Image (cartoon, helix red, strand yellow):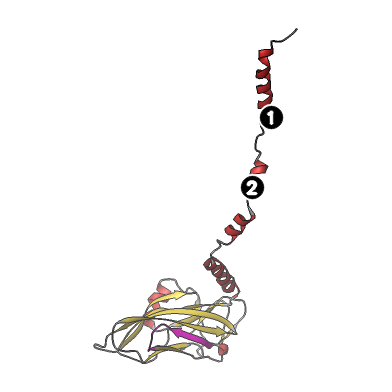
Amino acid sequence: MDFPTQLTPVFLALAACGTVESSSPDAAVNQVDAATIDAAANQVDAATIDAAIELADAAQRPFEIAYGNEFRIINTDQAQKSWMLVINTSQLPLNMETLEVRSFTDDHPTGVVTFTANPHDAMVGPGLAGGYTLPVYDTYLFGSDLVTETTSDNQSIASNMLSMALVNTPNGMYDINTSVTIAIGGVEQTLDIVVHVEPISGPTWFEAIAFTRE
């Protein structure tokens, strides 16, 4: 049977439709450019890396420090003592004779915040807190459960471990941001501290008004 010749274009059109290609998921994935991957990798923030390193260091550190991280000072250049405890988080005693100050710095143009270590020939046993803090700080340290460990009864370490003093600080009201890096047994820990200086008026005053544990 002969088909009318005018139907030929219709078949040709249908045949052409059959040649349309569909895109596959694999093809879409393969379009991801290597530069896009590199760009995504470069979005990792440096602070995130630093935080991970800090956490790893803390996990290996055999101690934690509970200390005054904010101070108020009026009319004095005397050293502030008895504001730090060392908590032994390891299974071995900590030799406090190895306590040392490695470095310290501050952001004041003329004034200097200095730190002095007072090492003792004594050990802080595992799970104990060593050092001495003023009774006025008990609420910050023990009342708030910042420190739940028993304080060591070793009298040779029941004293000041680290002292802080301000030198050449002018009269006025301002803040000084300072940090000190200490080490025990060669393992370092940096303590960040804010000092609120107030104008000379009335009695001498130098006290911690906030504590933290790191």
The answer to whether 49 is drawn above or below residue 85 in the figure is: above
**145 is within the stretch colored magenta:** no
**Left or right, residue 112 beside residue 201:** right
Residue 30 or residue 210, whichever sits in front: 30
Q: Which of the labelled discs sits on residue 137, or is there none? A: none
Q: Give the residue pinned by disc 2.
A: 31
Q: Give the residue pinned by disc 1.
A: 19
Residue 147 or residue 186, whichever sits in front: 186
Given the current orientation, which residue lies at the most extreme left position? 202
Residue 72 is at least partly visible in this image? yes
Number of on-image labels: 2
Residue 188 or residue 112, whichever sits in front: 112
- Occupied quadrant, residue 123: bottom right
Dot 1 or dot 2, earlier in sequence: 1
- Amino acid of disc 2: Gln
- Occupied quadrant, residue 183: bottom right
Q: Residue at x 53, y 64 (%)?
A: 45
- Occupied quadrant, residue 173: bottom left
**109 is within the stretch colored magenta:** yes
Given the current orientation, which residue lies at the most extreme front position? 5
Q: State which region is magenta.
A: 100-111
Neighbour class for label 2 at 10 Å: few (<14), some, many (≥20)? few
- Amino acid of disc 1: Thr
Residue 67 is at least partly visible in this image? no
- Residue 41 percent across, percent down from the top left: 59, 60
- Residue 51 percent across, percent down from the top left: 54, 68
Given the current orientation, which residue lies at the most extreme right position? 1
- Residue 141 percent across, percent down from the top left: 42, 76
